[in-house]
Image (cartoon, grey):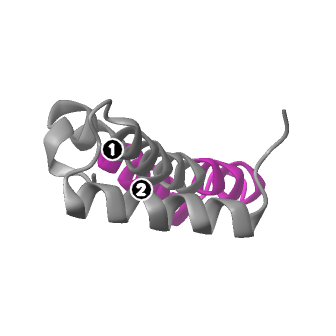
C-alpha cells in the first residue's frame, strides 16, 4: 500500500463529495475521507509554520504564524462539526 497519487486523491475526493451531496454514504466513508483530507491540510500548515519558525531563529513573526496555525487546529478539535465534510 502506498501513498495515493495526486490524480487518485483528486478522483477519490470528487467521488466522496458526490456521495455526500447525494446522501449515499451509509458507512460515513466519504465523510471521513473529506474530513481527514481537510485536517491533513491543517496539519501540513502547522508543520510548515513550525519549520519556518525553527529555521528563522524563532522570530516573533514566525512564532505568530505558528500560534495561529495551532489555534486553528485547536478550534477544530473543540468544535468538530465546524469543519468540512
Badge 2: residue crowd in 10 Å (few <14, some 14–19, many ≥20): many
- State whether the magenta stretch is mostly helix, strand or loop: helix
- The residue under the point 59% across, 58% down is 59
Coordinates of residue 61 in the picture (x, y in percent): 50, 66
Queried whether the magenta region covers residue 77, the answer comes back as: no
What stretch of residues is rendered in magenta?
A: 47-72
Badge 1: residue crowd in 10 Å (few <14, some 14–19, many ≥20): some
- The residue under the point 31% across, 50% down is 72
Coordinates of residue 60 in the picture (x, y in percent): 50, 59
In-front residue for pair 72/17: 17
Q: Are marks 2 and 1 in contact (CB under 8 Å)?
A: yes
On the rendered structure, is 34 left or right of 85? right
Q: Find residue 4 and name its label.
A: none
- The residue under the point 40% across, 37% down is 29
State whether residue 4 is above or below residue 11: above
**Local SS, label 2:** helix
How far is the residue under mark 2 from the one under mark 1?
7 Å
On the rendered structure, is 56 left or right of 25? right
Q: Find residue 16 and name its label.
A: 2
On the rendered structure, is 46 left or right of 22? right
- The residue under the point 52% across, 55% down is 41
State whether residue 62 is above or below residue 74: below
**Residue 49 found in image quarter:** bottom right
Look at mark 1 in the image and give the residue it sits on: 31
Queried whether the magenta region covers residue 61, the answer comes back as: yes
Total marks in image: 2
Quadrant (top left, top right, bottom left, bottom right) of the N terminus: top right
In-front residue for pair 15/81: 15
Coordinates of residue 39 in the picture (x, y in percent): 44, 46
Amino acid at each position: 500500500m502506498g501513498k495515493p497519487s495526486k490524480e487518485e486523491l483528486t478522483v477519490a475526493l470528487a467521488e466522496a463529495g458526490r456521495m455526500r451531496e447525494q446522501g449515499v454514504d451509509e458507512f460515513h466513508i466519504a465523510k471521513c475521507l473529506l474530513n481527514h483530507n481537510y485536517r491533513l491540510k491543517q496539519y501540513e500548515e502547522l508543520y510548515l509554520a513550525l519549520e519556518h519558525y525553527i529555521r528563522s531563529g524563532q522570530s516573533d513573526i514566525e512564532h505568530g504564524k505558528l500560534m495561529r496555525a495551532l489555534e486553528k487546529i485547536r478550534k477544530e478539535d473543540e468544535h468538530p462539526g465546524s469543519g468540512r465534510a
